[in-house]
């Protein structure tokens, strides 16, 4: 079992920045690749970013490439999502999740992630 708790969401103006955190407890955090997903109002949950177990490899959705940065601190059992130049379309509930299987496949596929947090709300005003 892994428990995940997201934090750091809030209300920000367009062009602003936020940093989300996801704290993990339970089984060894460093054994998991991690991902961030988001779900906007009336939309499907979509992939945002993923990090390999060491943090040495990352992968992003095209919509956030160049604006968001995923990182992790295995000593603190925490993964982060630095979000810069935020846009109103980034408004969503943001979730972190642990990835099953190999890093090299299905990094952006929701069903390849098993443990999920409860989410943290990000609202970007125009």
Image (spheres, helix red, strand yellow):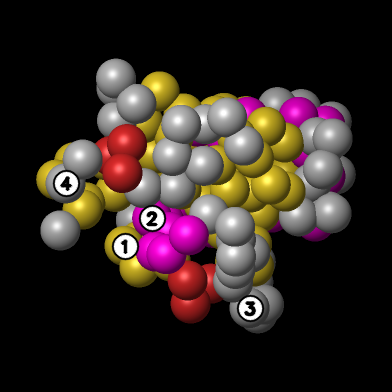
Residue corresponding to mark 1: 115
Quarter residue 78 falls in: top left
The range drawn in magenta is 80-102
| Nearer to the camera, 41 or 82 | 82
- Seen at 32% across and 36% down, the residue is 30
Residue 103 in magenta stretch: no
Residue 85 in magenta stretch: yes
First reached walking from the N terminus: tag 3 or tag 2: 3
First reached walking from the N terminus: tag 1 or tag 4: 4
Verify CB contact (< 8 Å) between mark 3 and mark 2: no
First reached walking from the N terminus: tag 1 or tag 3: 3
Give the x, y percent position of residue 11: 62, 38
Q: Residue 10: tell me if it is visible.
A: no
Give the x, y percent position of residue 61: 76, 55
- Seen at 34% across and 26% down, the residue is 74
- Seen at 53% across and 72% down, the residue is 110
Verify CB contact (< 8 Å) between mark 1 and mark 4: no
| Nearer to the camera, 98 or 90 | 98
Residue corresponding to mark 3: 44
Tag 4: Cα neighbours inside 10 Å, few (<14), some, or many (≥20)? few
Asked which secondary structure carries label 1, the reply is strand
First reached walking from the N terminus: tag 4 or tag 3: 4
Q: Residue 77: tell me if it is visible.
A: yes
Number of the front mark, 3 or 2 = 2
**Image disc number at residue 98:** 2
């Amino acid at each position: 079992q892994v428990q995940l708790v997201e934090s750091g969401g809030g209300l920000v103006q367009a062009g602003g920045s936020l940093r989300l955190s996801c704290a993990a407890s339970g089984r060894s955090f460093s054994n998991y690749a991690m991902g961030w997903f988001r779900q906007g109002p009336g939309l499907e949950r979509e992939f945002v970013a993923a990090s390999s177990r060491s943090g040495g490899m990352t992968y992003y959705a095209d919509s956030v490439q160049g604006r968001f940065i995923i990182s992790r601190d295995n000593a603190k059992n925490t993964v982060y999502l630095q979000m810069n130049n935020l846009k109103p379309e980034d408004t969503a509930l943001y979730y972190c999740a642990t990835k099953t299987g190999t890093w090299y496949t299905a990094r952006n596929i929701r069903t390849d992630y098993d443990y999920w947090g409860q989410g943290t709300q990000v609202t970007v005003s125009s």
